Image (spheres, rainbow, N blue to C red):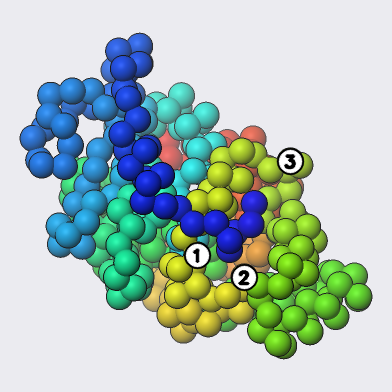
Amino acid sequence: MNRRNFLATGAASLAVAATPVAHASRMSQSEITTQQPDGLNPPGIRTAGIRMVPVADGKYKVWTKRMGSGPIKVLLLHGGPGASHEYLEAMESFLPQAGIEMYYYDQLGCNNSDHPEDTSLWTLPRYLQEVEEVRRGLGLENFVLYGHSWGGVLAMEYALNYQQHLRGLVISNMTAGIQSYLKRTAALKLQLPPDTLAQLNALEAKQDYDSPVYEKIMMEDLYPKMICRTHPWPEPVDRAFRHLNQQIYVQMQGKSEFLVTGNLKDWERWDRLHEIKVKALTIGARYDEMDPEDMKKMATLMPNASSVICQNGSHMCMWDDQAFYFEHLTKFLHSV
């Protein structure tokens, strides 16, 4: 569960990529794909919807997986930065059954994708380029882009730069600027008992973010309230935390969920939301580390957007307010 002490390894990536697909013959046709020769994927065999896509101008490759089949196609952008598609696996219990074709992908440096050591790759502009490379690699056009948390940052950036490819946009649990995010997290800290808050403030003043005490407060007092409120956490959430790429997270976010010191620290897009004219949905949650009022406000600033708030949910409301979340997500997807 410790989001800062576990790294996805290249060996783990290779092990997953090399998982046998002998069971593919038992899967429905909508769950498999036949690869064409491209040098990255074995030609002429079924691969359970998995396809490796070249990114960073062809220097590296990322893992993608198609599930379901239908006229509505959704590309899923996970959060982090540095997490993986795994905590979004709730999607496959709802979207394919609703006739929606969904695509997972692990961003470069994450989980099943390549893990370069080049730190110059961990920037918003480079990841934006990657989303477009993945879109082209998968042959997606007139599709819906879904972004959760950091993936919501990417989704907004993509809509501002490549809107012509979009059929719809979903921004889940991500506000439109870092300053509003920090305002919300500062308020959430004040809900801690006075002694615990004093400990947390003292550790942050010393920048002792690796302290076991700091970790304990995060994982026992804060995350179970604002990240995911189920008990225990769903296995895919635990798995995603184990696979978090710490280097990417620190370089882009920072050492703490409550202090953004990475290269995203000056990101603000409130004044450009009016440029996103595609049909859009923002999803917020009452207990989220993103202010649900911000999620509502974002929808009012986009010309063709609506908003829903999960009253029982937190940052991962696809798990802790699941029925409500997917009722409204699938309704929106069928409306685009």
Task: Give the SS element for disc 2.
Answer: loop
Q: Is residue 228 left or right of residue 267?
A: right
Q: Residues under labels 1 and 2: Cα distance?
A: 12 Å
Vertical arrangement, residue 155 with respect to residue 202, above or below: above
Give percent across and percent down for residue 39.
Answer: 10, 42
Q: Residues under labels 2 and 3: Cα distance?
A: 21 Å
Q: Specify the quadrant that holds the C terminus.
A: top left
**Looking at the image, is mark 1 or mark 2 nearer the viewer?**
1
Give percent across and percent down for residue 63.
Answer: 31, 45
Give percent across and percent down for residue 182.
Answer: 63, 77
Amino acid type at mark 1: Gln
Instruction: Say which residue label 2 marks.
Output: 257
Task: Give the SS element for disc 1.
Answer: helix
- Dot 2 or dot 3, earlier in sequence: 3
User: Which image quadrant for residue 326?
Assistant: top right
- Name the residue at 43% across, 67% down: 248
- Dot 3 or dot 1, earlier in sequence: 3
Amino acid type at mark 2: Glu
Give percent across and percent down for residue 332.
Answer: 47, 42
Instruction: Say which residue label 3 marks.
Output: 232
- Name the residue at 77% across, 65% down: 217
Q: Residues under labels 3 and 1: Cα distance?
A: 23 Å
Q: Is residue 3 left or right of residue 270?
A: right
Vertical arrangement, residue 332 with respect to residue 291, above or below: above
- Dot 1 or dot 2, earlier in sequence: 1
Q: Nearer the viewer, residue 219 or 132?
A: 219
Amino acid type at mark 3: Pro
**Looking at the image, is mark 3 or mark 1 nearer the viewer?**
1
Instruction: Say which residue label 1 marks.
Output: 246
